Every structure is written in C-alpha cells, then in structure tokens.
Image (tube, rainbow, N blue to C red):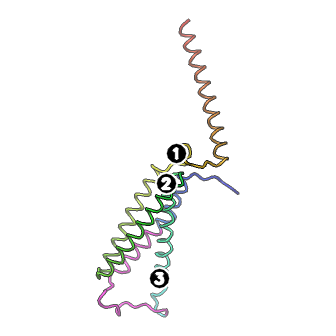
C-alpha cells in the first residue's frame, strides 16, 4: 500500500523517532559515567557475569544505533533543502565533512584526558542543540516540495500531472473570481 506522506511529516516523525531515544540514551550515559575515573580504570570494569552488564550493554547498543540513525536523519534533512541534485550533493558533502571534523575533535579531546562526565555532557548538549535546531527546520523551513522553485531539477511525471491538475483548478477558481468581480463592477456601474 502506497500512502503518500508529506516531506515535513516525515521529518517531524523521523526526528522524534530518532532524536528522543538518542537524547534519552545520552542522558543515561551522562548519569552512568558520573563516577568513572580515567586514572583508575580498574574501579568500574564490567564483565559478562556482572549484574550491571545488561544495563551497560543496552546503553551501548542504544548509543550506537541512535547515533548512527542521527546521521541518517540529518542527511534526510539536508536532502529536503533542495531537489537540485548538484546542490543536494554539495550539501551532503559539506555535512560529511562536518561529521569528520567532529570525529577528529572528539578523538583529540579524549586524548587530552578530559573526564568522561564532561565529554558526555558536551555531547549531550550538542545533540540537544541539534535536536532543537532540526525541530525548528522541520516545522518552519522544510517544504513538501521544491520542484518548481529550482532549475536543473528532474520532476517526476506524477508530480507534473498533479501540479498541472492543481494549476487547472487554481486557474478555474481565478477565472470564476474574475467573472464574479466583473459582474459586481458592472452591476455597480448601472
């Protein structure tokens, strides 16, 4: 069954489905690492047999899965800004570059021995800012289509047909309004 879902609705649904669990996982992560000590890693080891293993493993899976999905949802948002393939490819390339810079900074910060609590809190803050920014974009910036606003766009046939039908309806309504206004003007003049 092919149910059409608007681009804006997909953006909001995807952001909620990915962003909310991601933020929850990083809040959990921040709470989890509050007592970790970088200088003594023997204090908090977790082994398969430890009672704490299950919760630590679930947290690990949540962080990895939703962090990866976050990259996909941000790429979806970037794709929503243009239907022009060249512009979309350039935007995607810039986003991948930003990901790489962020990863390099993350490894650099970790190599300096910054506490896990600070690292986790900063990452949570960045995700929260990203979530709020993307919520704004989903609600106020993303349009359902940009096909007829840009050049160098290949428009699918079904979109052209739908647009042609919509134009015919709008032209008929404009024509009817014009006829009504002419008749009002004519009746006022007599």
Q: In which quarter of the image is the N terminus?
A: bottom right
Which one is earlier in the sequence, the residue at label 3 or at label 1? 3
Do the CB atoms of the residues marked 2 and 3 lie less than 8 Å apart? no
> Image height check: is 56 above or below 126?
below
> Image height check: is 38 above or below 117?
below
* Dot 2: element: helix
Tell us which disc is closer to us: 2 or 3. 2
Q: Tell me the residue that label 2 is attached to.
A: 87
Q: How far apart are marks 3 and 1 (CA)?
A: 49 Å
Q: What stretch is highlighted in magenta?
A: 21-48
Assess whether residue 33 is covered by the magenta stretch.
yes
**Residue at the location (36% across, 78% down)?**
107
Do the CB atoms of the residues marked 3 and 1 lie less than 8 Å apart? no
Q: Tell me the residue that label 3 is attached to.
A: 55
Pick out the residue farthest to the top.
Answer: 190
Q: Tell me the residue that label 1 is attached to.
A: 150
């Amino acid at each position: 069954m092919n149910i059409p879902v608007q681009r804006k609705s997909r953006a909001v649904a995807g952001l909620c489905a990915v962003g909310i669990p991601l933020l929850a996982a990083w809040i959990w992560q921040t709470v989890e690492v509050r007592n970790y000590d970088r200088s003594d890693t023997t204090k908090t080891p977790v082994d398969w047999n430890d009672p704490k293993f299950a919760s630590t493993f679930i947290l690990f899976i949540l962080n990895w899965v939703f962090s990866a999905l976050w990259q996909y949802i941000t790429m979806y948002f970037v794709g929503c800004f243009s239907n022009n393939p060249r512009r979309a490819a350039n935007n995607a390339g810039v986003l991948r570059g930003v990901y790489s810079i962020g990863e390099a900074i993350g490894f650099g910060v970790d190599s300096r021995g910054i506490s896990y609590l600070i690292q986790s809190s900063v990452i949570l803050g960045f995700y929260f800012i990203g979530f709020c920014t993307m919520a704004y974009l989903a609600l106020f910036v993303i349009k359902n289509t940009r096909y007829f606003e840009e050049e160098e766009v290949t428009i699918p046939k079904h979109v052209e047909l739908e647009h042609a039908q919509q134009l015919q309806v709008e032209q008929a309504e404009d024509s009817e309004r014009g006829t009504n206004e002419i008749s009002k003007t004519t009746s006022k003049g007599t």
